[in-house]
Image (spheres, rainbow, N blue to C red):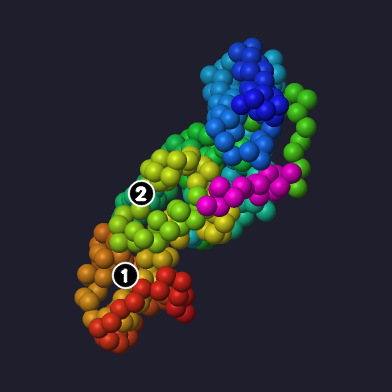
Amino acid sequence: MKSPHNRQRMVSMHKMLFEMARGNFNNQIPLSTCDDEIETLVVLVNMVAEELKESAFHSGFVNPYITHKMVTPATFILDENHSIKDVNQGALKILGYDSIEMLSRPIRDFIMDDFSYMSDLEKKELEEMLLSGEIITLNFITFKKLIVSAKCSVSRLSEGKFTVLSFVAPFLQLNEAPTESLDLKIERHNNFRKADARLMQRVYDYVLANLGEPLPSIKELARQFGTNDFKLKDGFRHFFHTSIYQFYTEQRLKRAYLMIEQTDIPLKNISFMNGFNSYPNFSKSFKKRFGFSPKELGRNKTGDFLIVDDINPS
């Protein structure tokens, strides 16, 4: 605490808190390479400022440091797998991403709401309800890790192959705030520390060790590993190029593939041993991944079974 660098960080936090008390939530304290308690406080103060700024605006608070630009329509075109096929400029402005950062990625990567707990039947019922004209409130995650809650409408294009997800939300224009270039965004996004890499490896190992159990929600995992859900989702995707849920599902299916191929355990038992709540859900997921049902896979019935997590059956 006595070092000049630590004193400077404490002074920066004091100044930040005074500015927040004046109603100015636009300042951010630069992060350092330190991985200590003070750096944790810096991150928390920055997050509080961002969330207060967003809350104050939505509550109608007139802040002299910002300009209300407009209410912006946001539109996403999703393919049959709910991945983003196209996106309009309004959505990019509201969420703070560039199109290359969003295209071809699943829409769930940008939504805080966790639908993984829902069964396939419940997801199908929800999709049919939305396509009938119902409105759903979703919580989108911006590039700066803020939450944008919006009432969304869903419709389907005439050919039936693509779904349109749309909403409107206020877009803020900061006074005298320089525009952040894509290079700076990428640099900041890639600025993960060694501690983050170790944390993500622990999460990776935990998922592999618990394939037979239901995957906890992202919030529960974040609490378990002492981080926040935004950092957990972004960090895991940065290091392993997939989401935690996709990794979990992929590894369960690979494990089930080997169990079917190498043992004579009943298929229904294998589905439950790999965390699926019903055999039909397992069979559907298996066929989608490998192109054929579990019953169509030849069985060697050797009696000896070794789980190899990194195998990739073709």
Residue closest to the eye, 243 or 19:
19
Mark 2 touches mark 1? (CB < 8 Å): no
Q: Which is more N-terminal, label 1 or label 2?
A: 2
Q: Assess disc 2: are there few (<14), some (14-19) or many (≥20) residues with their C-alpha within 10 Å of its C-alpha.
A: some
- Count of all numbered marks drawn on residues in the image: 2
The answer to whether residue 192 is magenta is yes
Tell me if mark 1 has few (under 14), some (14-19) or many (20+) residues whose alpha carbon lies within 10 angstroms of its own.
Answer: many
User: Closer to the camera, 176 or 148?
Assistant: 176
Q: From this view, report whether residue 310 is shown above or below residue 114.
A: below
Prevalent SS, magenta region: helix
Magenta region: 184-198
Q: What residue is shown at x 30% (from left), y 78% (from top)?
A: 305
Which residue ends up furthest to the top in the rendered image?
22
Residue 28 rendering spot, x and y as whole percentages: 67, 28
Q: Residue at x 61, y 41 (%)?
A: 143
Residue sitting at x 43%, y 65%: 250
Q: Residue furthest front?
A: 2
User: Would residue 82 be visible to someone looking at this image?
Assistant: no
Residue located 36% across and 60% down the image: 209
Quarter of the image where the N terminus is located: top right
Q: Secondary structure at mark 2?
A: loop
Circle number at residue 247: none
Q: CA distance from mark 2 to mark 1?
A: 22 Å
Asked whether, in this view, residue 303 is left or right of residue 59, the answer is left
**Percent x, y of residue 238:** 58, 54
Residue 59 visible (yes or no)? yes
Instruction: Indicate left or right for 259 with 180 as reference.
Output: left
Residue 216 has which mark? 2
